[in-house]
Amino acid sequence: MVWPLLLLPFAAFPLRNLPRRYRYPGSVPLPQQQHRQPPVSNQNAWLLNQIEGYDTSSTRQANVAGADLGIGFEFKGEFFLLFGDTFGVGSNFSVDTGARLDWRSNTLARTKISRHKKQLHLVADEWNYDTDNKTRARQLLHAAHVFPDPVQPNARPTEVTVIPTAAWADHKTVYVWYMSVRHFDGDAWTCNNASVATAQASHGHHSHGHNNPLATSEFTKHDDINWQPDPYNLNLPLMFAVVNWKGMGHRTPKHLSECPVDPTSIYLMATPCGRTGPASLLKVPSDQLLNKAEYLYFGGVDHFGVPRWHRDAGSAKPVLPSFVGELSVMWVPSVRRWVALYTAPDRHPVTRACGIVARISTCLWSGWSEERLVLANGTDSDIAYGGFTHPALHDDSTDDLLYFTASLHFRYNTYLAAVDLKKVFHEELA
């Protein structure tokens, strides 16, 4: 073990990216953050602005110095972002006594979206707070923060953290898919299970003026619906991603001509825990999201090309090959394609790229293009991961750019980024 490396700031190393030997720091100070400009453009994408961080008033009040992911959803006319492990400022981290630097496994912020000279700008505007404490952003979903014993990892029940992976909302309820993480080991993670949590609008808060409909909402875990890992089938889905399009839940995507989807269903893609497995496809009626028996798994097509759907997760057929992590999928009308963004680890056998990559297809369950690099590692000497997009960030009629959130490992902040899909996929879209 290289002891001097343990003195590096803990918040600069999100747990999911740590090598095994650096995952148990004893007591590491978190420094005060200074204002930092977004890095310059790299490869095919541009980082436009930092979304959260201690240099903005709303996140300073919420004691958010660093957070990752930024998974978007709309609710009552507002656009929200879910963040993963979130850290505050001014104290130390101790494995023995728990998180003392205000470590929250997950947080939520209402955002403010604006445009300047046709360029999108996105920032965290107001956080979900405890009802009796508006000086910090609340952890939405409880996490035990119990680490494995370094000598005997299986000696005790552990839950390092609880991370949201997807979200969707109807007019009444917000649904959040999440995973309970037992152990991080590079890109191969071990999960206890995956499940769904829900929330309704805060009492007395409505979506008009500057009011936040989720300002003090409580999120409830539904432990009766969960997905368990299976040592005999390492491809079972545990990390869910909502397949987004404008009007999902009640109308089909605009300009979709091939492989029609059911407008009353929510489609999801899902991977095993970590970044090394393939992605499978699911669908569930939009009014049955808390009924696991109604989740159907894509099991291939018949001789007419019609998809087969099964209730058994073990029958799922991959639609994207292995080495998919932190997945996001959306229909983009301007290019008339489904777009999948995800993290590709550096040991990927094709691209050898660690960073955010993309594929496109006219069909959810077949015909996906080869990977194309979107945002590579090396952006401002940092490591890029995530890549979450949403229809609220896209103008169907005028935008040639696809906007998405991206996290940087060493800075440990989340950024708004953009990529020109017609440039990246010029051959496929010619």
Image (cartoon, rainbow, N blue to C red):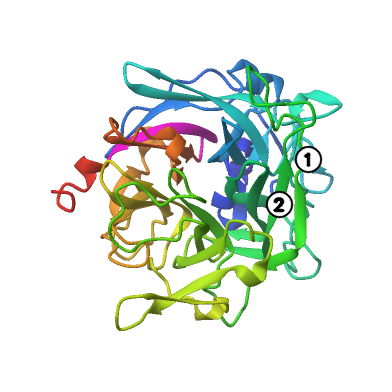
Instruction: Say which of 221 and 36 sits in front.
Output: 221
Dot 2 falls on a residue whose secondary structure is strand
| Residue at (47% x, 57% y) in the render | 325
Q: Is residue 219 above or below residue 240?
A: above
Is the residue under label 1 in contact with that under label 2 (CB below 8 Å)? no
Residue 93, by quadrant, is top right
Numbered circle sitting on residue 197: 2
Magenta stretch: dominant secondary structure? strand
Q: Is residue 411 visible?
A: no
| Residue at (60% x, 40% y) in the render | 82
Q: Amino acid at mark 1?
A: Glu
Instruction: Say which of 401 and 148 sits in front.
Output: 401
Q: Position of residue 223 (x, y in %)?
A: 77, 61
Q: CA distance from mark 2 to mark 1?
A: 10 Å
Residue 99, by quadrant, is top right
Residue behind mark 1: 218
Q: Position of residue 349 (x, y in %)?
A: 32, 66
Q: Amino acid at mark 2?
A: Ala
Q: Is residue 86 above or below residue 95?
A: above
| Residue at (69% x, 66% y) in the render | 226
Q: Is residue 220 magenta?
A: no
Dot 1 falls on a residue whose secondary structure is loop
The stretch in magenta equals: 409-420
Q: For this view, does 242 lie left or right of residue 118?
A: right
